[in-house]
Amino acid sequence: MAENINVGGINVGLNPEEMKGKKVIVIIFGTRPEIIKLFVLYRILKKSDEFYPLLYNTAQQKISGDILTKIGIHPDITAAEKPNRSSDLNELIAHLLTDFNEKFGENSPVTKKNLHGIIVQGDTASAFSGALWGFLNQIPVFHAEAGLRTYDKLNPFPEEFMREAVARMTTLHFAPKGINRDNLIREGIKPENVFVIGNTINDAIFTLIKEKKIKEPAEKNYILSTFHRRENWGYVSDYARVLNTVMNDVSGYSEILHLMHPNPLIQRSFDEVMAGNPHEKLKIMSPIHDYFEMLGYVKNAGCILTDSGGLQEESLFFNVPCGVLRKTTERPEVLKKNAKLLPIDKPEITSFLTEAIDYRKVHQSKYNYTYGFGDSSYLIYELLKKFYGIQTEFSYL
């Protein structure tokens, strides 16, 4: 096989001979949550006799290379980074559609004529752009984590619209729960194209537990905090004021660990509120780019306050109480378990943190299997074989 060399974002070590007789599937990711939820599926397809997966990094976010290296994968194709990739979605989406055309152009090692399918995950601009490009080129699109809805296009913004739009362009929909399947069917998606397979986040966590890669911090019983969503940008100062005073009224936690988002707008609002003198039990930390370390912090937390979608899922797996700092959530199943929607209001947040202490004591060290038992990626693999009419001696379905 040729030596792997990256030219113009393409691994030219790709060997077309290895692709012969296999279905070439592009797996698109551009954010850390996407690759975390796709790496087990990528491993399965990479080892299979039926498929040749191409891992395409859109560079929507700057993802630590350590994550990819430690889970043993390397992107085959990487888009050029855009300076405003996180804030100017118009520029990002236009850039990605052009990049897909270039990377799979007539002079590329793999052209769009060679592609049999595209896998996208979730609700990002990368997923939306990948699905749109696949649809416009009549390439089957497969959507992992399909059917999540709030039916409020401004919450979460713009992810709610993007997830709905991806559904209109998708060939097979892989839904985590029955409620997600029902959403899709109500929207006119044919039932025979929707499959309830759980959420691949549990595949990732089970795999990392098995491989002993989760790094637990020495600290325990802290409040873990994150705050970053676009629809919350106007409330950053209010939330900072809550964090800076809530420990005066809550006992039972060691401290608050707030992971500061790199967005300058968010940082500036926090700085103005703290004025260089944060509460003695409030620790402002840089984002934890090491996902294995981040999972350790989730596992050891006494409670989590967040507007993150991924943390809702991860906190549920480890049964950590989670205050969801949003008006609504596309994951309503968590509200029946460990989570509660919270306004940016000190009395309500204080009340939740107090109630959460008893929940954590009861559920300590118990895993929650709401999103499956770690076999979602294998189910997708089997469904892809069925879609392409591939017969094998063993079927997982």
Image: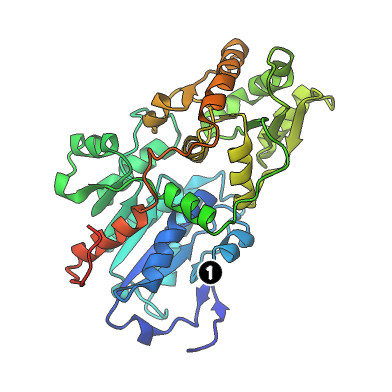
Q: Which quadrant: the C terminus?
A: bottom left
In this orientation, which residue lies closer to the viewer: 333 or 83?
333
- Front position in the image: 136 or 4: 4
Q: Residue at x 43, y 66 (%)?
A: 43
Q: Position of residue 73 (x, y in %)?
A: 52, 67
Q: Residue at x 25, y 46 (%)?
A: 168
In the rendered view, does 386 fall on the left or right side of 304?
Answer: left
User: Which residue is at the front of the view, 351 or 238?
Assistant: 351
Residue drawn at point x = 34 percent, y = 67 percent: 25
Local SS, label 1: loop
**Residue 124 at x, y = what percent?**
44, 46
Name the amino acid type tagged 1.
His
Q: Residue furthest bottom?
A: 1
User: According to the image, label 1 marks what residue?
Assistant: 74
The image position of residue 101, as x and y in percent, is: 40, 67
Residue 341 located left or right of residue 262? left
Task: Give the side of residue 45 with respect to residue 397, left or right.
Answer: right
Residue 230 figure quarter? top right
